[in-house]
Image: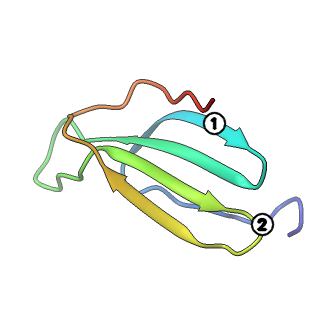
Amino acid sequence: MSGSETLFVAPSYTRGLAIRDDTIYVGQSNLRRGADRRAAGIHILRRESGQQTFIPLPSEEVYGILVT
């Protein structure tokens, strides 16, 4: 992975970021206007493998992420 490589492009507003070991967690909130509604949730990105997972949340917005 080079310093200028794009790892992830979010389809909606991003809110909250946490990094732990090889994993990046990015929060996603719904778009507030328009017909293109996206589920709020958390994107989980594995840097080594490039694997991406999305966990939808029963919420309209994500305000922050805390990984312990």
> Which image quarter is the C terminus in?
top right
Q: Residue at x 40, y 59 (%)?
A: 54
Query: What residue does disc 1 label?
Result: 18
Q: In the image shown, does 63 or 49 lie closer to the viewer?
A: 49
Q: CA distance from mark 1 to mark 2?
A: 19 Å
Q: Is residue 48 left or right of residue 53?
A: right
At 51% from the left and 30% from the top, the residue drawn is 65
Q: Name the side, left or right, on which 40 lies relative to 26.
A: left
Task: Name which residue lies at 17% across and 52% down.
Answer: 37
Which percent across, then down, holds residue 44? 53, 55
Q: Nearer the viewer, mark 1 or mark 2?
A: 1
Pointer 2: what residue?
A: 5
Closest to the observer: 7 or 20? 20
**Given the image, on which type of amino acid does mark 2 rest?**
Glu
Lower position in the chain sequence, tag 1 or tag 2: 2
Percent position of residue 17, x then y: 59, 36
The circle on residue 34 is none
Tell me the quarter of the picture where residue 2 sits. bottom right
Query: Label 2's element?
Result: loop
